[in-house]
């Protein structure tokens, strides 16, 4: 008779925490573009700085930050609700922060969704009001490309008609695919 050893609860939670993001979190007609490892930088004051490690996912109608820590919620920022997108420290984008963050992307927005806090499937928590989040990419050389992509997708998501949004997002996607080269010899 074989005995099956049960895994401790913590090991099971760690296993599931790696797979928190799902394409089901995206809205209708929303496409996943790219992912970057990043830190979400939170300031509770000028002295208290907190970095939350995770991955920043760029989608056609939103920006999603999936923290590595299971206790932190997945953050979803709709691009339509963004007021300002830019490199951190440019054009007064860092008014809430005392110092500029190298390799940082600043998003000023009016609404954010918190998903799967403590990895519990529950209705999204919505927070409204003008807020600024700063994300620091691990590869600071990609900040300009990411900001440019976000600005293009923001313009597309702010169009009134869904057909116009889809057409512009398709054009952005085709442009990106045309610039990508694959090694056919491998």
Image (cartoon, grey):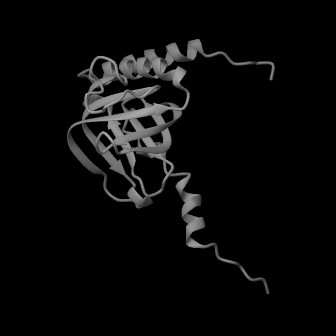
x, y (%) of residue 140?
Answer: 52, 24
Q: Is residue 167 visible?
A: no
In-image side of 149 versus 107 (left or right): right
Residue furthest bottom in the image: 1
> Residue 168 location in percent, x, y?
38, 17
Q: Is residue 80 left or right of residue 21?
A: left
Q: Would you say 129 lies left or right of 53 here?
A: left
Identified at 57% across, 60% down, the residue is 14
Q: Is residue 104 visible?
A: yes
Q: Is residue 134 above or below residue 9?
A: above
Residue at coordinates 47% horizontally, 35% vertically from top-left? 57
| Location of residue 14 with respect to 129 vertically, above or below | below
Asked whether 83 or 92 is in front, the reply is: 92
> Quadrant where the C terminus lies?
top right
Tell me where residue 83 sits by quadrant: top left
Residue 186 vertical placement versus 70 (above, below): above
Residue 78 position in % (x across, y down): 31, 34
Question: Which residue corresponds to the image point at 25% horizontal and 48% vertical from the top-left?
Answer: 126
Position of the N terminus by quadrant: bottom right
Determine the image quadrant of residue 27.
top left
Q: Residue 186 or 106: which is nearer the viewer?
A: 106
Which residue is more in the foreground, 167 or 49? 49
Q: Which residue lies at the image location 47% right of the left edge and 56% below the top edge? A: 70
Residue furthest front as drawn: 47
Pick whichever, 106 or 44, lies toward us: 44
Q: Quadrant of residue 48?
A: top left
């Amino acid at each position: 008779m074989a005995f099956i050893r049960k895994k401790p609860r913590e090991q099971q939670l760690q296993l599931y925490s790696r797979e928190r993001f799902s394409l089901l979190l995206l809205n209708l007609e929303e496409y996943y573009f790219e992912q970057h490892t990043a830190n979400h930088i939170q300031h509770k004051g000028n002295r208290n700085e907190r970095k939350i490690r995770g991955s920043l996912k760029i989608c056609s109608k939103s920006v999603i930050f999936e923290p590595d820590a299971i206790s932190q919620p997945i953050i979803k920022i709709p691009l339509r609700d963004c007021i300002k997108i830019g490199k951190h420290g440019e054009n007064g984008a860092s008014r809430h922060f005392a110092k500029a963050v190298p390799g940082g992307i600043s998003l000023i927005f009016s609404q954010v969704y918190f998903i799967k806090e403590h990895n519990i499937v529950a209705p999204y928590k919505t927070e409204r009001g003008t807020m600024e989040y700063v994300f620091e990419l691990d590869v600071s050389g990609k900040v300009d490309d990411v900001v440019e992509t976000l600005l293009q997708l923001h313009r597309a998501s702010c169009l009134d008609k869904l057909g116009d949004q889809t057409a512009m997002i398709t054009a952005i996607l085709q442009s990106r695919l045309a610039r990508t080269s694959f090694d056919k010899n491998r």
